[in-house]
């Protein structure tokens, strides 16, 4: 299992940053390799990715979500993928976003990329692009403020 943890400080209020992160279908705008995400319902989504020539489709479920605090998820099909994103208020106008992602590299290419730290750089780049996305917009594209207790 590979684990990546990266953070970025975003010049936007915590509610704006959190609200944008709940808009999964906007992820292709700032996440490298994410071709599309379809929100199936409040807690389920379908992802299509292509990273390093590896095409993947998988489904995820939000396992815990608390507005302005955290969103945790796990894959629900054959792909081993899980993570949590936390939101930390640094000031009225600055929010730290921390992403921890755990996944199981499959095949020689993914295992080599993981060993060389490509996944760490990818997550950091994605967070930096998220920062640019929300800071350049000045507001979120939408929001979902529902609460999903752990274990639901």
Image: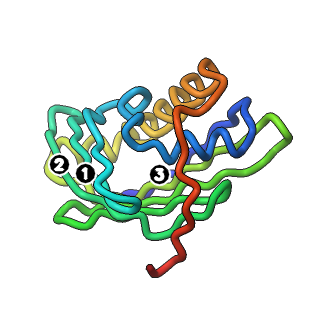
The reply, left or right, for residue 5 in relation to residue 91 is left
Rate crowding at label 2 as few (under 14), some (14 to 19) or many (20 or more) other CA atoms within 10 Å. some
Residue under label 1, please give it.
Answer: 46
Residue 102: horizontal and vertical position, in percent? 40, 59
Q: Secondary structure at mark 1?
A: strand
For residue 107, above or below residue 65 = above
Q: CA distance from mark 3 to mark 1?
A: 22 Å
Q: Secondary structure at mark 3?
A: strand
Residue beneath the point at 48% across and 30% down: 125
The reply, left or right, for residue 82 in relation to residue 52 is right
The reply, left or right, for residue 9 in relation to residue 132 is right
The reply, left or right, for residue 75 in relation to residue 117 is left
Residue 130: horizontal and vertical position, in percent? 53, 31
Determine whether label 2 and label 3 are within 8 Å by CB: no
Q: CA distance from mark 2 to mark 3?
A: 21 Å
Residue 93: horizontal and vertical position, in percent? 81, 34
Question: Which quadrant holds the N terminus?
Answer: bottom left
Per the rendering, the mark at residue 4 is 3
For residue 38, above or below residue 42 = above
Residue under label 2, please give it.
Answer: 57
Q: Is residue 109 visible?
A: yes
Determine whether label 1 and label 2 are within 8 Å by CB: yes
Residue 5: horizontal and vertical position, in percent? 53, 51
| Colour mapping used in the image | rainbow
- Which of the two labelled residues, at mark 1 and mark 2, occupies the earlier sequence position? 1
Residue beneath the point at 45% across and 59% down: 83
């Amino acid at each position: 299992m590979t684990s990546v943890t990266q953070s970025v400080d975003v010049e936007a209020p915590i509610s704006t940053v959190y609200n944008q992160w709940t808009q999964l279908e906007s992820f292709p705008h700032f996440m490298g390799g994410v071709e599309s995400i379809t929100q199936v319902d409040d807690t389920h989504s379908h992802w299509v990715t292509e990273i390093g020539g590896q095409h993947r489709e998988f489904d995820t479920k939000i396992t815990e979500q608390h507005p302005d605090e955290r969103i945790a998820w796990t894959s629900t099909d054959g792909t081993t993928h899980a993570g949590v994103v936390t939101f930390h208020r640094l000031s009225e106008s600055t929010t730290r976003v921390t992403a921890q992602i755990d996944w199981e590299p499959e095949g020689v290419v993914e295992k080599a990329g993981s060993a060389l730290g490509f996944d760490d750089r990818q997550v950091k780049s994605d967070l930096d692009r998220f920062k640019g996305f929300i800071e350049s917009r000045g507001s979120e594209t939408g929001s979902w403020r529902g609460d999903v207790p752990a274990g639901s």
